[in-house]
Amino acid sequence: MKITPIRNEKDYQNALNRLEEIFDAKKRTEQGDELEILSILIDRYENENFPIGMPDPIEAIKFRMEQMGMKQKDLAEVVGFKSRVSEILSKKRKLTLGMIRKLNSTLHIPTEVLVQDY
């Protein structure tokens, strides 16, 4: 097992290829240890070179509603009137702190996502 830091695209591709080769390695074996270390290195490289930004708060709400099979009327029970839900989803009304707390606890959307400007 010869593991080196991932410093460039070539190193990254080599690490991915090796990871694929040993993907089914058993834990607590030499290949299992290599798999674990490569996974950590690849994750670090991807986070540094291909960062994924936070989603738009309203798009996150819409996505979560879709996942949960919710309609606008269902969201009205969380944030208030149906007209308020419509204004929020069309970005005509900002989320209040109270709404953010309710959305966080009901839809399980991280507050870091909900408090962003939009």
Image (cartoon, grey):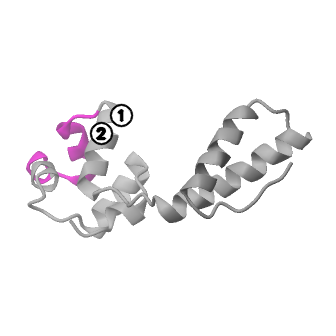
Query: From the image, which quarter does the C terminus lie in?
Result: bottom left
| Residue corresponding to mark 1 | 68
Secondary structure of the residue carrying numbered label 1: helix
The disc placed on residue 48 is none
Q: Please name the residue that numbered disc 2 is placed on.
A: 65
What residue lies at 8% left-to-right and 49% top-to-bottom? Answer: 83
Amino acid beneath label 1 = Met
Q: Is residue 74 magenta?
A: yes
Residue 38 at x, y = what percent? 72, 50
Does the magenta stretch mainly form a helix, a strand or a loop?
helix
* Residue 30, horizontal then vertical, whole percent: 90, 42
Res 53 quadrant in image? bottom left
User: Marks 2 and 1: in contact by CB < 8 Å?
Assistant: yes
Q: Nearer the viewer, residue 76 or 31?
A: 31
Q: Residue at x 72, y 33 (%)?
A: 21
Q: Which residues are magenta?
A: 70-84
Does residue 38 appear to the left or right of 106 in the view shown? right
List x then y, in percent, for residue 3: 79, 55
Q: Is residue 62 left or right of residue 46?
A: left
Residue 28 visible: no
- Front-most of residues 18 and 26: 18
